């Protein structure tokens, strides 16, 4: 009986954490789909997770994060002029990912 009482809260905690992960994975997939459609760029899941973890209120929705990522990875005229491309960033997070056709 004691084992059951100890195991029940643990099982509930694992179940609740699974819901958070699923929601987070869904948000990450949604942002990846939005960026791919908008600017043909797919950021890594780690990059998106790091951006979301900053807690920036300006990046509260998937659309806002996707828009910020697309703006960051768009070619900059100044970078082309001076030769060295600048590492794109959103909320202090360097954007990692790849362009698609």
Image: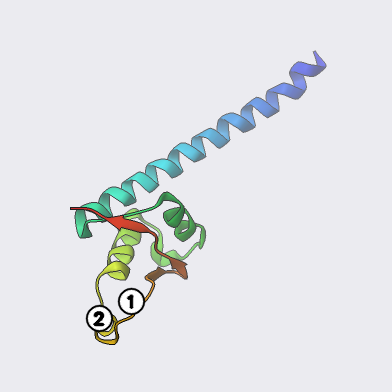
Looking at the picture, how far across and down is residue 32, in whole percent? 32, 50
53 vs 73: above or below:
above
**Quadrant containing the N terminus in the rendered view:** top right
Q: Of helix, strand and loop, which one carries label 1? A: loop
- Dot 2: few (<14), some (14–19), or many (≥20) neighbours within 10 Å? few
Which numbered tag is attached to residue 80? 2
Looking at the picture, how far across and down is residue 89, in whole percent? 40, 70
Task: Specify the quadrant of the image occupied by residue 66.
Answer: bottom left
Task: Specify the quadrant of the image occupied by residue 11.
Answer: top right
Question: Is 22 placed left or right of 39 in the picture?
Answer: right
- Dot 1: few (<14), some (14–19), or many (≥20) neighbours within 10 Å? few
Residue extending farthest top: 1
Spatial CA distance of label 2 from label 1 is 7 Å
Nearer-N-terminus badge (2/1): 2
Q: Are marks 2 and 1 in contact (CB under 8 Å)?
A: yes
Question: Which residue is at a point 51% across and 57% down the rendered structure image?
Answer: 53
Looking at the picture, how far across and down is residue 100, in whole percent? 22, 53
Looking at the picture, how far across and down is residue 76, in whole percent? 26, 78
75 vs 19: above or below:
below
Question: Is 13 placed left or right of 89 in the picture?
Answer: right
Question: Which residue is at a point 42% across and 55% down the rendered structure image?
Answer: 48
Viewer-proximal residue, 49 or 97?
Answer: 97
Residue extending farthest right: 2
Which numbered tag is attached to residue 85? 1
Question: Which residue is at a point 24% across and 73% down the rendered structure image?
Answer: 75
96 vs 27: above or below:
below
Task: Specify the quadrant of the image occupied by residue 63.
Answer: bottom left
Which numbered tag is attached to residue 56? none
């Amino acid at each position: 009986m004691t084992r059951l009482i100890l195991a029940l809260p643990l099982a509930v905690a694992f179940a609740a954490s699974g819901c958070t992960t699923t929601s987070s994975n869904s948000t990450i997939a949604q942002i990846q789909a939005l960026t791919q459609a908008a600017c043909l760029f797919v950021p890594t899941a780690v990059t998106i997770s790091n951006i979301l973890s900053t807690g920036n209120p300006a990046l509260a929705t998937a659309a806002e994060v996707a828009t910020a990522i697309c703006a960051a990875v768009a070619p900059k005229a100044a970078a082309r002029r001076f030769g060295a491309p600048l590492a794109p960033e959103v909320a202090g997070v360097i954007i990692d990912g790849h362009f698609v056709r």
